[in-house]
Image (cartoon, grey):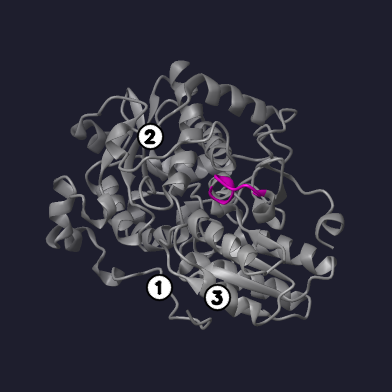
Amino acid sequence: MQCSLGPEASPNGNWGPLVTRKSVMRSGLAALLVAPFTVSSLAAGRGQESGGSEAESSDLAEGRGATDEEIVLGVSAAFSGPSRGLGTELYRGAMAYFNNVNENGGVEGRRVSLKLYDDGYQPDPCVQNTMRLMLEDKVFLLFGYVGTPTVTRVLPILKKFQDESIFLFFPFTGAQPQREPPYGEFAFNLRASYNQETAGLVDNLVQIGRRRIAVFYQIDAYGRSGWAGVRAALDKHGERLAGEATYSRGEKFTGSMRKQVEILQGVSPDAVICIGAYAACAAFARDAVDLGLDVPIANLSFVGSENMLKLLTEGQDDAERYTRQLINSQVVPSYEDTSIPAVQEYRDLMARYDPQVPADLVQEEYAPFPHSFGSLEGFLNAKLMGEILRRLGPNPDRAGLEEAVFSIEDFDLGISERVSFGPDRRQGLQSVYHTVVEDGRFVPLDDWGARFG
């Protein structure tokens, strides 16, 4: 695979001016919106409701996602395919919190329900799911989407339907499109951005003398977002990318990354920053070690740290060989640190409820982790979402969502950083954490020089 750039993926995809209420109903998608999706397109539209009973469609139409009994949040995420662990872990953490809310009377007497669809981390199914959530299910808002290539295709739809006041809350992506014009006003983010993550990695690597930094990235909107972040961070230090290699979304751990490793070996990097999902990034790390590319290999938070570690260590006699050079960036604190109030709350509720993805959405075996950075992020997303719903008062209406969000100022989520939003601040948290593997688990990285200098 050549290390040249392909065409930039457009966030508009193939929708552009076609996305209007009338054109959607006239198009072939209309049939998809009123009938169950087939198993094709990675099982797009395999739906399930969690947290409450099925609401009457007439009630949802009248209340726009909120009835006297429930508030319905719409989710399209990866529950199948090589990246299914990402959607599963995020969902489990969110449901641990929402289950507790519902068990204790809900929000103003309304239970919080999630209407779920699987998109397999693919853009077209995500678009289809989103249209169904908005036009047929008439959910109150969109919540907990997974991935940049999916979210960037949804943002233009939200802009087209902006009169409906449908917002996307807390997607599992740090990319820029939902943080800046023309689509930033239709989304709210909790996690730090990929620009912040890549800057943190580059700054620390340069500080310990590792200035020749290469990138391995998924060749789509997600990969390009991280690639751009690394380039911008290097530019501030007067450096350029030492080299780059790419892979296609959906690659499995069983695939070979030998060619990508050889491309980067040819430029003699001091470190490699990976922008991808756990299966491909684990395959790259494995092949890098096997082929002698002995440099720090860093990953962004999206990678799915626990799943990556499991792939690299399961069945290995010398697992430490494959993990000693790993650095994984995170956007939530360590789930092992029970001195943090929200972490203790998360662990208690995960143990109490142990949420599982509804059986109808499970196509492939997946063993969830008792705790993970992904599920902790989902938990914090749900905790803040619950507070926003409470601030809507006894008569929730989409038109009041922005005002409710903007009233979040210096809010204590139970972690070290407080959360604030405003018209010009649509990202709640700014902190980035760095972790390394010790004794088979990710722990905070305290001394970059001692470990990688």
Visible residue check, residue 105: no
Q: Residues within 10 Å of mark 3 (few under 14, many from 20)?
A: many
Q: Which residue is mark 2?
A: 357
Question: The disc labelled 3 sits on which kind of residue?
Answer: Ala
Name the one closer to the observer, 225 or 258. Answer: 258
In the rendered image, residue 24, in percent from the top left (x then y), is placed at 19, 60
Q: Nearer the viewer, mark 2 or mark 1?
A: 2
Measure how far apart labels 3 and 1 are at the Cα level: 21 Å
Q: Quadrant of the C terminus?
A: bottom right
Q: Which residues are magenta?
A: 311-319
Q: Which mark is residue 245?
A: 3
- Is residue 318 part of the magenta span, yes or no? yes
- Is residue 2 part of the magenta span, yes or no? no
Main SS of the magenta part reads: loop
- Residue for point 24% across, 68% down: 18
Tell me which numbered mark, 3 or 1, is placed earlier along the sequence.
1
Identity of the residue furthest to the right in this view:
450
- Residue for point 57% across, 51% down: 312
Query: Which of the 4 image quarters holds residue 334?
Result: top right
Name the one closer to the observer, 292 or 432. Answer: 292
Question: The disc labelled 2 sits on which kind of residue?
Answer: Val
